[in-house]
Amino acid sequence: MIRKVFVVASIVFAALAPTALAQVQTFAPVTQQMLENPSPNDWLMFNRTYDAQRFSPLNQINKQNVGRLRMVWSRGLPAGTQETIPIVYRGVLYTIMPGAGVLAVDATNGDQIWEYQRTLPDDLRNFAGAATASRSKTLAIFEDMIYYTAPDGFVVALDARTGAVRWETAAHDYKKGAQHSSGVIVAEGKVISARTCGNAETREDGCYLVAHDARTGREVWKFYNTAAPGEPGGDSWGSVPTADRKASAWGLPGSYDPVKRLLYWGVANPTPYTRLKRHGGNINDIPQSSPADAYSNSTVALNPDTGKLVWYYQELPGDDWDLDHTHEKFLIRTTVNPDPSAVKWISSRIPRGQERDVVVTVAEGGGVWAVDRSNGEFLWAMPFPVDTPDFHISRIDVETGKTYINMDKVFKKDGDRVLVCSFNTRGYWPPAYHPGKNSLYIPFHDSCLDMTANQGSESGFGPRVGVPRPGSDPNAFTGLAKMNVSTGKVDRIYSAATPSNGAVLATAGDLIFWGDVDRRFRALDADNGKILWETIVGGVVQMSTVTYAVNGKQYVAVMTGSGQSGTAGVERQVPGMHLVRHNAIYVFALP
């Protein structure tokens, strides 16, 4: 077991591992070029590539033979929250373990190579909960190190060969309310991490992205998720002091364009949740249109060298319900030709049929937005999964791209109760993009939010619960939508009553791998959603789905276990569900 030295600054450790640890026998350092253009055999980051597409060029497993898929190994994991996605490099699978650990195993059979278990402060439970409740979602790899965000607020670099600590740096003080609920990516030699800060005392206590030198752990830059006076959007918070302007980036890490040298990140809702609570009872302290409470519920584009803001686009101004526009940003090059019969808001300024580099956001609170990758220019947007008067956006100015909150759903006084849509349409489990189909495959729940304003609570709400959308079909509560990125046209290719917490995976075999909370893991036809293969695993399919190849053989891996609100929230909406919360890894291959 590797023991942590408790410090408040960066410490660099010797590269030699304890002799008791096993190690990766042959290891070639991972370069920036490899991250930009990974081998099809590897899965080097949580969505495989910087563009977050979750597409694998592997096609050994395809529509013709997927029915022969068999489990080749499985491995149990410790109890606790499981919301992670593994990475794979040259036949070694690395994953976060529930309870603040990292595990490296042989990707062909699950045999342990090394294990790192973090020793945590005795008082952590009083501030951030038990170690088993830690929620870090991603690892990263660069050169010969694996990077992990620990529940005690440290970014930790481990030797990829042995699991020995190479350096660790405090990214936030866990005693001040921030938590590592997101994860890391590495770009241009920097480890970039995010966190949740809803319980932080001030924005300076955790409402930021931070970059550390990947080799030494030295802090390089910090970007605050909310605008201060004098910054773009700095006057959009009304009378709220800078220290109280809080919005986290709690979800999946962002994306990176190495050609444009821009990071794209999603910032979540402002806190407290309601305008009434944030703005001293005055809902008109901020505008009804964007920007309002910037950069909450926005896509921000940052310079990776300095962390400076290049542009931002706010999808939901002055959120009143905690609807979260965080998570990955899809970077896609496509012809922009939105179909007016499918897309509600289309820019009046863009030429049709032009090929462009776009950023696509699929919001947790529903809706899809497409903006230009270079400057954030609005291209098109639409409600998703359905267009309803209860949708949280009332309109978008198609000339300017300015968004308007649905004021009919904004709390006007304490005790008001509203139904707003959508809610946890998707969660921290990512969709996937298939370039051969020019389509996003988006998992969704047909869910809305029933919420009451409560000025007596710190968050400004209570009670607050997700509910199936009124009038929706309970047998189609969950679906998989195939959305053409050029036209915005959506085809629902799969529907079911059972919710999902599983990441979507698209492959060159024209397959879509996806699982649900009722232990079913499936391969679907990428053209029409037909189930081509199905198996039952030992628990809730949670995040995780990846594919890789070792010695010419393709494998598909999935992890099971229980998320926190992502699992409990959908479980409450489907009567009679009895979930199995068993943590494990399952890996499949052809005979």
Image: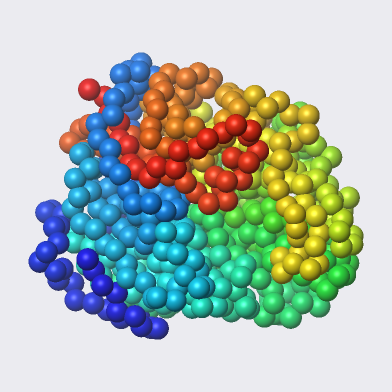
Q: Can residue 590 be seen in the rendering of this structure?
A: yes
Q: Position of residue 525 (x, y in %)?
A: 47, 21
Q: Position of residue 289 (x, y in %)?
A: 82, 59
Residue 102 versus residue 243 in the image, above or below: above
Visual colour scheme: rainbow
For the N terminus, the quadrant is bottom left
Lateral position of residue 303 relative to residue 280, left or right: left
Could you tell me which residue is drawn at 23 percent across and 77 percent down? Answer: 13
Could you tell me which residue is drawn at 63 percent across and 33 percent down? Answer: 575
Res. 4 image quadrant? bottom left
Relative to the observer, which residue lies in front, 326 or 474?
474
How many dots with numbers?
Answer: 0
For the C terminus, the quadrant is top left
Residue 130 versus residue 484 in the image, above or below: below
Relative to the observer, which residue lies in front, 155 or 313?
155
Could you tell me which residue is drawn at 11 percent across and 54 percent down? Answer: 25
Lateral position of residue 347 relative to residue 330, left or right: right
Relative to the observer, which residue lies in front, 156 or 361?
156
Res. 279 image quadrant? bottom right
Q: Position of residue 96 (x, y in %)?
A: 35, 55
Q: Can residue 214 be seen in the rendering of this structure?
A: no
Relative to the observer, which residue lies in front, 263 or 217?
217
Lateral position of residue 201 relative to residue 547, left or right: right
Q: Position of residue 214 (x, y in %)?
A: 34, 69
Q: Residue furthest bottom?
A: 8
Could you tell me which residue is drawn at 50 percent across and 49 percent down? Answer: 563
Lateral position of residue 106 relative to residue 487, left or right: left
